[in-house]
């Protein structure tokens, strides 16, 4: 899997890289210290499967930068790794379709658990970030997934056979790299199929596509 770590602190990048490679030595990790460097890598490396982004780094401008990144690369999953832990920022990030939010105050074990979850195609947000005065606002998995559009099931009829295969694997929690390996394609080709499928079904981002694959298309895709 190709992963981009975007953070202006070299020590944080080093720590995240070490955790990722502890989980799987085959991960290819790219590093950027600014928004412009991040974009340059995403343009150059067409097969980035995951971005780990800090909300505070040169050119990023917190949530505004995150919004720009999501608009430019809607099919690339993004996980925020941030010093900020206030609920407002967390929820705004989730509304933009990130698949995870990891506080920098997390222990090494917590970060490892978070990576295991997101690399498996799940959504991760620490429970404490979405609690208020001890009362749970919503379960993590629910709060982490903004309500996506719900296209009519017959929208599946507009998909090509290959797009339906990509959707099926997406619903199983597979990364772009895993889908590419299963289908004998490049990760770039998978991203193209994913983007076309999302456009046809009216899905805003990858988290909405995963939600659709799991809750709507799971039976119809393979039928």
Image (tube, rainbow, N blue to C red):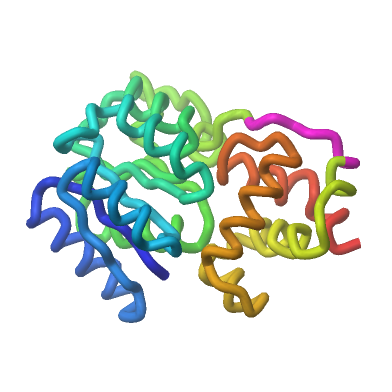
Q: Is residue 204 above or below residue 25?
A: above
Quadrant location of the C terminus? bottom right
Q: Residue at x 37, y 59 (%)?
A: 115
> Is residue 52 found left or right of 176 in the rendered image?
left
> Is residue 221 found left or right of 211 in the rendered image?
right
Residue 59: x and y, percent? 19, 33
Quadrant location of the N terminus? bottom left
Q: Could you say which quadrant of the image residue 17 lies in? A: bottom left
Q: Could you say which quadrant of the image residue 183 lies in? A: bottom right
The chief SS type of the magenta part is loop
Residue 73: x and y, percent? 46, 44
Q: Is residue 15 above or below residue 185?
A: above
Magenta part of the chain: 148-154
> Is residue 185 found left or right of 83 in the rendered image?
right
Q: Residue at x 68, y 40 (%)?
A: 199
Q: Is residue 150 above or below residue 39?
A: above
Q: Is residue 64 above or below residue 8?
A: above
Q: Could you say which quadrant of the image residue 44 lies in? A: bottom left
| Number of numbered discs overlaid on the protein picture | 0
Q: Is residue 83 magenta?
A: no
Q: Residue at x 13, y 54 (%)?
A: 12
Residue 181: x and y, percent? 58, 78
Residue 70: x and y, percent? 44, 37
Q: Residue at x 55, y 36 (%)?
A: 145
> Is residue 42 found left or right of 83 in the rendered image?
right
């Amino acid at each position: 899997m190709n992963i981009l770590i975007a953070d202006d602190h070299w020590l944080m990048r080093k720590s995240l890289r070490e955790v990722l490679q502890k989980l799987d030595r085959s991960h290819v990790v790219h590093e950027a210290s600014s928004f412009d460097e991040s974009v340059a890598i995403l343009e150059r490396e067409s097969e980035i499967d995951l971005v780990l982004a800090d909300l505070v780094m040169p050119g990023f401008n917190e949530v505004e930068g995150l919004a720009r990144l999501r608009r430019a690369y809607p099919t690339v999953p993004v996980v925020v790794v941030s010093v900020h832990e206030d609920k407002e920022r967390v929820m705004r990030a989730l509304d933009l379709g990130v698949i995870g939010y990891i506080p920098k105050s997390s222990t090494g074990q917590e970060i490892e658990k978070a990576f295991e979850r997101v690399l498996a195609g799940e959504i991760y947000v620490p429970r404490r970030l979405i609690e208020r005065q001890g009362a749970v606002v919503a379960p993590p998995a629910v709060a982490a997934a903004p309500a996506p559009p719900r296209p009519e099931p017959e929208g599946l009829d507009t998909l090509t056979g290959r797009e339906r295969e990509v959707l099926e694997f997406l619903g199983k929690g597979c990364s772009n790299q895993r889908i590419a390996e299963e289908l004998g394609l490049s990760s770039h080709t998978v991203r193209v199929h994913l983007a076309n499928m999302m456009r046809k079904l009216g899905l805003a981002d990858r988290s909405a596509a995963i939600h659709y694959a799991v809750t709507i298309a799971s039976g119809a895709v393979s039928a």
